[in-house]
Image (tube, helix red, strand yellow):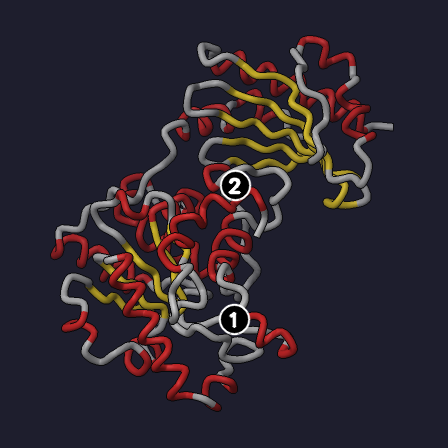
Amino acid sequence: MGIIYSGMMKESERLFRNSENVNYWPYIGKGYFNCSTKILVLGDSHYLPDPSKRKKMECEYPWWTNEVVIADYLDQGYKQNFSSFDDFPKWIPQPKGSHLKGFRNTAKMLAWNVNHDYGYRNQCSDYVWKNLAFYNFFQRPVATRPRSHEWLMSDYDNYVSQARLAFDEVMNKLNPHVVIVWGKKDLYKKWLPANRNRLYPDSIFFPINHPSYNIRHEYIEKWSELVRLQNIDEGFVQHNPIYKRVETIFFNDELKKFIGPFSKWYGERSIGYRMNSKSGDSNAVVLLVTMSENGETVLTLSTRKESDLETIKIVKNSSFDTFDRKRSLDCDGLFELCTIASNATDEDVISKILIALKAMKDCSEP
């Protein structure tokens, strides 16, 4: 788990670091406890391709679940350029059949009611995870690969009894109003305690098929019905306050015309433009436009090259003379080009972005 996201685990560590049963601390979104409807998403297990690491992962890796949610899903492939969950870029495709799609598909189901007026857009849902919690039921890896339970079956009773003790602790500390269960068959019907409704009378259990491949529309409809019948507050489906300005700038016609060799994405409070070199993504140069809550906009240039020379070459381009460059390259290979004041107009920000993109394009040409 990288330094960038260490702060996101503090609440989980505080609640469970002294637990005798919870080996893998649950992921707890930073807005979870502030929501009037607290939602816990429950998976079943972790898998471990390398059996030689089994002992270590059973006893010495409490952040494993957080790593799956934060590093693998929310920050996949962009660890160098993003500083918080708010920057998670939209439109990132998960590999076909990947378990990571389960996170996005769950968010899609939860966000459907709120977004249906203008048609659901897949990129709008990931921020929901800021307000959710996630936990895997079994507290030891169950097998070396998905859909296989060799270790679980070899010690079945101990696996299940330990998992139920840990789950009880998680339920009592997180107090979710709704538990979305990833698995209608084994997890819901066999492994969870049969008297769960009596044990946790204030929680609603909502089982669905594992959503790694898709989310069936029947679950979207059932979730909508549950929201209506239980008067569930959908306030957990929200955007960062600065998000509207991000969208306005990202979809600006002048910037859209200047695509050239760039790939681009946007997040809740950031926009990214990647200049891909001929040698591949590993050598990409990235312009990151980050907007703070107080309205300031920061333009940062970074490179994935082993050397910082490429970034320096671009920064020295005469096009950047209009920038107030106060910070040199730091240890992460990032160069802050300028900070645009909070009272700047969208047009001011767009003009600075265009200058930077043109300089990056000029420097990429032979």
Q: Amino acid at mark 2?
A: Pro
User: Looking at the image, which is closer to me, 253 or 158?
Assistant: 158
The mark nearer the N terminus, 1 or 2, is 1
The picture places residue 102, in percent across and down from the top left corner, at: 44, 61
Q: Is residue 261 visible?
A: no
For label 1, the residue is 59
Q: Nearer the viewer, mark 1 or mark 2?
A: 1
The picture places residue 333, in percent across and down from the top left corner, at: 72, 33
User: Looking at the image, which is closer to me, 103 or 119?
Assistant: 103
Q: Is residue 89 left or right of residue 38?
A: right
User: Which corner quadrant of the image does residue 359 belong to?
Assistant: top right
Q: Residue at x 65, y 11 (%)?
A: 324
Q: Secondary structure at mark 2?
A: loop
User: Which corner quadrant of the image does residue 360 belong to?
Assistant: top right
Is the C terminus in the top left, top right, bottom left or bottom right quadrant?
top right
The picture places residue 216, in percent across and down from the top left corner, at: 35, 64
The picture places residue 326, in percent across and down from the top left corner, at: 66, 15
Q: Is residue 318 visible?
A: yes
Q: Amino acid at mark 1?
A: Cys
User: Which corner quadrant of the image does residue 44 belong to?
Assistant: bottom left
Label at residue 115 = none
Q: Say if mark 1 contacts mark 2, CB within 8 Å.
A: no
User: Looking at the image, which is closer to me, 348 or 9?
Assistant: 9
For label 2, the residue is 89
> In this picture, is 283 found above or below 301?
below
The CA distance from mark 1 to mark 2 is 33 Å
Around disc 1, counting alpha carbons within 10 Å, would you say few (fewer than 14), some (14 to 19), or many (20 or more)? few
> In this picture, is 16 found above or below 6?
below
Q: Secondary structure at mark 1?
A: helix
> In this picture, is 41 found above or below 118?
below
Around disc 2, counting alpha carbons within 10 Å, would you say few (fewer than 14), some (14 to 19), or many (20 or more)? many
Q: Residue at x 45, y 35 (%)?
A: 268
